[in-house]
């Protein structure tokens, strides 16, 4: 869970920090071993896991997917600039760190609506001229793409990667997700790519129950079926192996380990092996006919 439930624009960091409702960035960070969360985040997650124990595995599988995707984009696709929508709190192997492992000249713009993400990100990147973090609501793509800090680092005349990793479920149908997800990639130069993932449920009834529980806690959420996700990308072309369960997207056991989870979350590790109907689904896509060269 990356993006957040506060309103705002990419104009500035004046959004108050919510202490009385959970935020997805903080809950997601806790599942990755992070410490930047509050009792409200932990309590909400612990109320969710008995019914949806897969969430811990899903969050961690998505983080492993991030490493493989960014490695592919830099090493094989030649991408040198990234926009990470709904980036979440900094943790190990963030996009800019993975990208620079394979391409030292990579440039990254992080976008999130949680003001805590902005504060931590700016501290982390204070001396980094080729990476920045901005406050933005990913539903307002124009404000994000016109933000002066993004314009400073991202050249739309060169191929870029737009990442919506584990945030698709925060875009409800009322948000016009198909438009949100393709705005940047359709503006971008040939050779640009879109990385995407979101939580899906094979059983629509269980997916609806998950949606009701999480959105009822104050976090905008819509669990979709794989077919419903596929429909969002009509007209875009997935790269091999297509849109799949993330564990099946170019799997590779030889990647950096994640931080250990909090002891309270340990009982939920491995739940996706027992319950295979809810999982993170995604891949990498492009606009057909726009391959560079």
Image (spheres, rainbow, N blue to C red):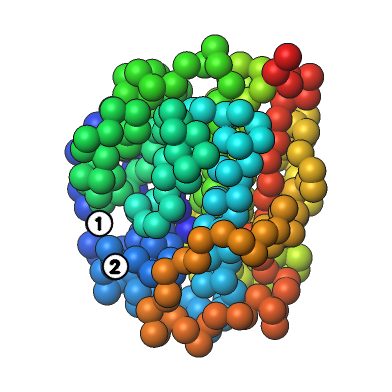
Q: Which mark is residue 35?
A: 2
Question: Which residue is found at the position 21% from the left and 45% from the top?
Answer: 123
Task: Please tell me in which quadrant of the rendered image residue 72 appears.
Answer: top right
Within 10 Å of disc 1 (Cα), the crowding (few <14, some 14-19, many 20+) is some
Residue drawn 27% across the image and 33% down it: 128
Displayed quadrant of residue 290? top right
Residue 131 in the image: above or below residue 155 = below
SS for dot 2: loop
Q: Position of residue 212 (x, y in %)?
A: 55, 66
Rendered view: 253 above or below 104: below
**Residue 89, above or below 51:** above
Residue 281 visible somewhere in the drawing? yes
How far apart, in angstroms, are the residues tagged by discs 1 and 2? 16 Å
Which quadrant holds residue 248? bottom right
* Disc number placed over residue 18 in the picture, else none: 1
In what quadrant of the picture does the C terminus appear?
top right
Q: Nearer the viewer, mark 1 or mark 2?
A: 2
Is any atom of residue 174 visible in this view? no
Give the image location of residue 245, x and y in percent: 72, 59
Which residue is found at the position 44% from the left and 21% from the top?
154
On the image, the x and y values in percent for residue 179 come to 61, 30
């Amino acid at each position: 869970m990356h993006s957040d439930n506060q309103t705002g624009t990419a104009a500035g960091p004046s959004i108050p920090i919510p202490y009385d409702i959970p935020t997805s960035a903080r809950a997601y960070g806790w599942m990755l071993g992070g410490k930047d969360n509050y009792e409200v985040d932990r309590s909400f997650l612990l109320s969710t896991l008995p019914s949806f124990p897969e969430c811990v595995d899903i969050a961690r599988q998505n983080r492993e997917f991030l490493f493989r995707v960014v490695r592919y984009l830099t090493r094989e696709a030649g991408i040198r600039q990234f926009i990470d929508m709904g980036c979440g709190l900094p943790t190990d192997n963030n996009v800019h760190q993975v990208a620079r492992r394979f391409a030292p000249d990579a440039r990254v713009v992080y976008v999130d609506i949680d003001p805590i993400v902005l504060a931590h990100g700016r501290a982390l990147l204070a001396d980094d001229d080729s990476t920045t973090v901005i406050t933005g609501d990913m539903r307002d793509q124009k404000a994000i793409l016109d933000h002066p800090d993004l314009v400073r680092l991202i050249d739309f005349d060169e191929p870029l990667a737009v990442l919506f990793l584990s945030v698709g479920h925060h875009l409800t149908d009322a948000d016009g997700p198909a438009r949100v997800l393709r705005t940047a990639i359709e503006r971008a130069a040939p050779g640009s790519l879109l990385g995407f993932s979101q939580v899906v449920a094979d059983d629509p009834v269980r997916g609806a129950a998950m949606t009701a529980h999480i959105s009822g806690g104050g976090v905008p959420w819509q669990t979709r079926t794989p077919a419903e996700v596929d429909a969002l990308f009509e007209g875009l072309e997935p790269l091999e192996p297509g849109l799949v369960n993330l564990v099946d997207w170019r799997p590779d056991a030889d990647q950096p380990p994640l931080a250990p989870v909090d002891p309270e979350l340990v009982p939920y590790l491995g739940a996706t092996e027992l319950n295979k109907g809810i999982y993170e689904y995604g891949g990498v896509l492009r606009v057909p006919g726009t391959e560079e060269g």
